Amino acid sequence: MKKIEGHIHLIRAMAGSKGQGRLNPLGNGYAIWDDGEIIHLLPVENIEKAVLLQGTLNGYQNYYTYQVIKRYPDRFIGAFAVDPFAERAMAIVKRHVEELGFRAIKFEISQVGGLHGFHKPFRLDDDVRIGQIMHYLADYPGFVVTVDYGDDTQTSYQPEAIVNLAKRYPRMDFVVCHLSFPNADHLERLANVLQQFAPLKNIYLDISAIQDIDGEKPTDFPYPRCQKTVALAKQIVGAQRLIWGTDSPWSATFNTYHQLATWLENTDLFTDDELADVMYNNANRVYFKAANVAAAQAAEDPVVARFKKSR
């Protein structure tokens, strides 16, 4: 089955660290921990394309993402990230859109792992700095805004802000990461969020990292708790608005990448056509729009070009 990895983080140098020491690359998808254990981070499965997202956990990899997309334009598309409270935030946004060809932005605003961890609480739908960014992006129909707002215990949790933005910018697409942080013991809470999203066809949800979010272990494969939450999402918003992803490499330290890449195929949640939508078609339609891919492929960094010319 063809797959598009809908939520993965690009890291320039592999340097994972835990009780087994440091993680060191071996090539061809393999890596070795300092204690000698070899793991296979990337599966043999047919991962056709990938969506490269940003996060503060790994550090923003905006420029490296641009370089990777330029080198492999048929395989990757990416989102950039910016701290909207930075003095030159708008200059950063305009450079990445106009010069580097990005047509997606990632707002990692969660309290635990994002902007709410080091800024005062703010709202995506009424903060003037974010409003300025959104007004600018509205000039690019088909632009994708991807948001990780954390779980309901965090001040950053604001699904209703996504609803307001989706109404305000109907020609843009919004992707909520991690299925809005589900908990199989609190399905009514998830249902409330999904029912808010359901009428708005420009809101999608990726289902990355829900295994570790809901406490599933490798021995739980194919993840009964996750099956409950995804089944509810299918019921309320439909399979055509769900995007498979893993949130690797972080999530691949809890469950293997192979498990994360194949778990849906080992359930009866979707028909064959629905599974093809979740695993490939939806991400292709949202992130790999022809105009967005063309913008990324055509981009040439004028700053670096001038630098090279002057040397």
Image (cartoon, helix red, strand yellow):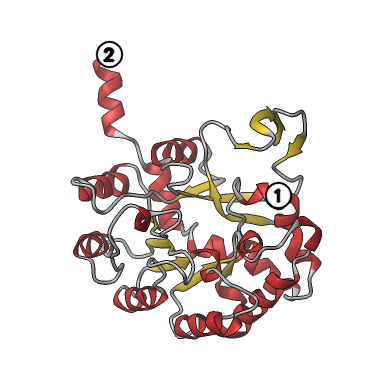
* Image position of 170 with respect to 176: above or below: below
- Circle 2 crowding by C-alpha within 10 Å: few under 14, some 14–19, many from 20: few
Which of pointers 2 and 1 indicates the residue nearer the eye? 1
Residue 28 on image: x %, y %: 71, 33
Q: Secondary structure at mark 2?
A: loop
Q: Which residue is mark 1?
A: 257
The circle drawn on residue 201 is: none
Q: N-terminal of the two: label 2 or label 1?
A: 1
The C terminus, quarter of image: top left
Which residue is at 58% across, 53% downward? Answer: 247
Q: Secondary structure at mark 1?
A: helix
Which residue is at the front of the view, 104 or 148?
148
Residue 302 on image: x %, y %: 27, 33
Q: In the rendered structure, are the residues bearing label 2 and label 1 in contact, judged by CB atoms less than 8 Å apart?
A: no
Tell me how far mark 2 sits from mark 1, CA to CA. Answer: 44 Å
Which residue is at 59% across, 48% downward? Answer: 250
* Image position of 44 with respect to 165: above or below: above
Residue 2 on image: x %, y %: 70, 56
Which residue is at 74% across, 46% downward? Answer: 43
Q: Amino acid at mark 1?
A: Tyr
Q: Which residue is mark 2?
A: 311
Residue 1 on image: x %, y %: 74, 58
* Image position of 32 with respect to 105: above or below: above
Which residue is at 37% across, 61% downward? Answer: 143
Image quadrant in which you'd find residue 13: top right
Q: Amino acid at mark 2?
A: Arg
133 relative to 1 in the view: left or right:
left
- Circle 1 crowding by C-alpha within 10 Å: few under 14, some 14–19, many from 20: many
